[in-house]
Image (cartoon, grey):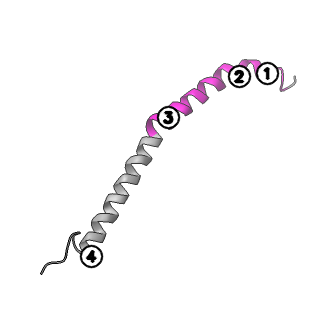
Amino acid sequence: MSAAGNDTGGRPRRRRMEIFAFLFLTAVLLPAFAVATVGSYGLGVWVYQMLAGPPGPPPR
């Protein structure tokens, strides 16, 4: 048997797996990366302000 002969049976399964992978990436992974990016930026700003002081004009 050749590998090309068995390809027709695996196409629907492969298509389902590709759709599942696309939905997983767009619905789970990318939002998680976005939250992690914004959260790490906020943490960095918070730590910077703890070390350098709050923003604004210096006190007189």
Q: Position of residue 18 (x, y in %)?
A: 61, 29
Dot 3 amino acid type: Phe
Residue marked by disc 3: 24
- Measured in 3D between alpha carbons, the distance from the residue under mark 3 to the one under mark 1, in whole angstroms, is 28 Å
Q: Position of residue 48 (x, y in %)?
A: 30, 70
Question: Which sits earlier in the primary sequence, circle 3 or circle 1?
Answer: 1
Establish if 35 lies above or below 56.
above
In the image, 46 versus 17, the foreground residue is 46
- Measured in 3D between alpha carbons, the distance from the residue under mark 2 to the one under mark 4, in whole angstroms, is 58 Å
Residue marked by disc 4: 51
Label 4 SS? helix
**Residue numbers of the magenta segment:** 3-28
In the image, 34 versus 6, the foreground residue is 34
In the image, 36 versus 2, the foreground residue is 36
Residue marked by disc 1: 6
Pointer 1: residues within 10 angstroms few (<14), some, or many (20+)? few
Q: Is residue 58 left or right of residue 23?
A: left
